[in-house]
Image (cartoon, coloured by chain):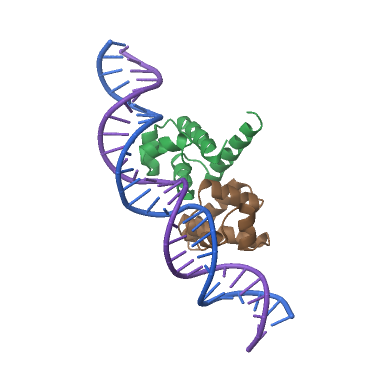
Chain colours: A brown, B green, C purple, D blue
Amino acid sequence: MDAAAAFGRVLRRARRRAGLTQEQLGLEADLRRTYVSLLELGQQQPSLTTILKLATALQHQPGELVDLVVSEMEKVANGN
Amino acid sequence: MDAAAAFGRVLRRARRRAGLTQEQLGLEADLRRTYVSLLELGQQQPSLTTILKLATALQHQPGELVDLVVSEMEKVANGN
DNA sequence: GTCAAATTCCCACTATTGTGGGAAGACGAA
DNA sequence: TTCGTCTTCCCACAATAGTGGGAATTTGAC
């Protein structure tokens, strides 16, 4: 699993846990609704500032979010 | 201080601590020598995969690196 | 099944990330 | 000073991050 896909899974999980729609998250983080979708689908990867925006909107430590991505990649690397 | 500048300062500090030149770090992380320079100068910000590559080359947790960036931004926000 | 809300997909486009190579400048040691 | 190493700056360029809007599809509640 590449970083974009792992980030997408982590993002979707965190967004749902926060009870937000993609559009609401987009408003909070100042990102397009359709771009949030692309990220969750793992079709694009975020830049640093996008990571920071999303983490803030989701009320996470940015570093925590990144480490979740790393675990997600390891998880799948070790046969799910 | 914006995210790119903060990342640059953190990156330079970590690289020097590791005793690497920009070129050596570039080789480890599979990034151009000149691009490492741009990042350290805060003239560009990294994408997620670039963050992961650099953290690995510097033997840091990626999330740790990101949180150092956040503290760097806060530090300066509060008058150094 | 129906309906509204949520998400994905489509278009085109702009801005920025990252490559590639080389020249110029800065730095430190002898 | 002189030499070698490290870093910055310059060029052009390719790839992808992110915008903007709208149509098609999926999803879940009723």
Please state the horizontal and vertical placement of residue D23, each as a whole percent of the image. Answer: 51, 74
Please state the horizontal and vertical placement of residue B1, each as a whole percent of the image. Answer: 57, 35
Is residue A75 in view? Answer: no
Asked if residue B28 is positioned above or below residue A13 in the image, the reply reads: above
Residue sitting at x 61%, y 62%: A22
Asked if residue C29 is positioned above or below residue D15 in the image, the reply reads: above
Would you identify the image quadrant in which residue B32 lies? top left
Residue sitting at x 51%, y 41%: B60
Residue sitting at x 45%, y 38%: B39
Closer to the camera in the image, A28 or A14: A28
Please state the horizontal and vertical placement of residue A70, each as a whole percent of the image. Answer: 52, 52
Asked if residue C16 is positioned above or below residue D10 in the image, the reply reads: below
**Left or right of residue B63, residue C23 in this image:** left
Closer to the camera in the image, A71 or A14: A14
Would you identify the image quadrant in which residue B23 lies? top left
Residue sitting at x 47%, y 32%: B12
**Left or right of residue C27, residue B71 in this image:** right
**Left or right of residue B34, residue A70 in this image:** right
Number of labels in the image equals: 0
Closer to the camera in the image, C23 or C27: C23
Please state the horizontal and vertical placement of residue A30, each as a whole percent of the image. Answer: 60, 53
Asked if residue B80 is positioned above or below residue A2 in the image, the reply reads: above
Is residue B54 in view? Answer: yes
